[in-house]
Image (spheres, rainbow, N blue to C red):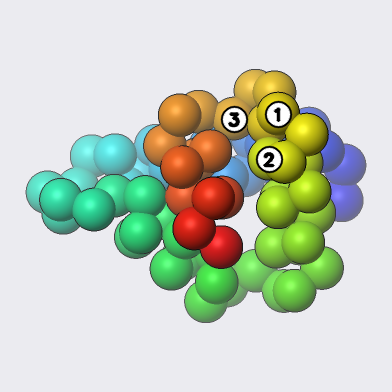
């Protein structure tokens, strides 16, 4: 998948969990990604975040650090 599509997807997930009452939103985003993204997609996100994560929301970037 392209980086742009991945960024858009993870930011959408983060935007959803940002509205939830849970206290550890980054953990919820990371859990969702772990449950529903295949290992290749998770590795792509991890590598992208390690390169700076341009375009990722702060919550998405925090979640990527928990993967």
Q: Are the two marked residues, 2 and 1, in contact with CB atoms closer than 8 angstroms?
A: yes
Q: Horizontal placement of 25 versus 58: left or right?
A: left
Q: Secondary structure at mark 3?
A: loop
Disc 2 residue crowd, few under 14, some 14–19, many 20+, Cα 10 Å? many
- The relative height of residue 59 versus residue 63 in the rendered view (above or below) is above
Q: Residue at x 54, y 50 (%)?
A: 65
The residue at the far right in this view is 2
Out of 17 and 46, give the one closest to the viewer: 46
Q: CA distance from mark 2 to mark 1?
A: 5 Å
- The relative height of residue 3 versus residue 52 in the rendered view (above or below) is below
Q: Horizontal placement of 47 versus 25: left or right?
A: right
Residue at image mark 2? 49
Report the mark closest to the observer, 3 or 1: 1
* Marking on residue 52: 1
Residue 5 at least partly seen: no
Q: Horizontal placement of 12 versus 5: left or right?
A: left
Q: Secondary structure at mark 2?
A: helix
Q: Residue at x 75, y 74 (%)?
A: 39
Out of 20 and 61, give the one closest to the viewer: 61
Disc 1 residue crowd, few under 14, some 14–19, many 20+, Cα 10 Å? few
Residue at image mark 3? 56
Q: Residue at x 49, y 58 (%)?
A: 66
Q: Position of residue 38 (x, y in %)?
A: 72, 74
Q: Position of residue 62 (x, y in %)?
A: 46, 42
Q: Based on the displayed image, in which of its 4 quarters is residue 22 positioned?
A: bottom left
């Amino acid at each position: 998948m392209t980086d742009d599509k991945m960024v858009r997807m993870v930011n959408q997930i983060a935007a959803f969990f940002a509205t939830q009452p849970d206290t550890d939103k980054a953990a919820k985003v990371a859990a969702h990604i772990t449950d529903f993204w295949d290992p290749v997609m998770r590795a792509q996100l991890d590598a992208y975040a390690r390169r700076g994560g341009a375009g990722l929301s702060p919550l998405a970037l925090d979640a990527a650090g928990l993967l």
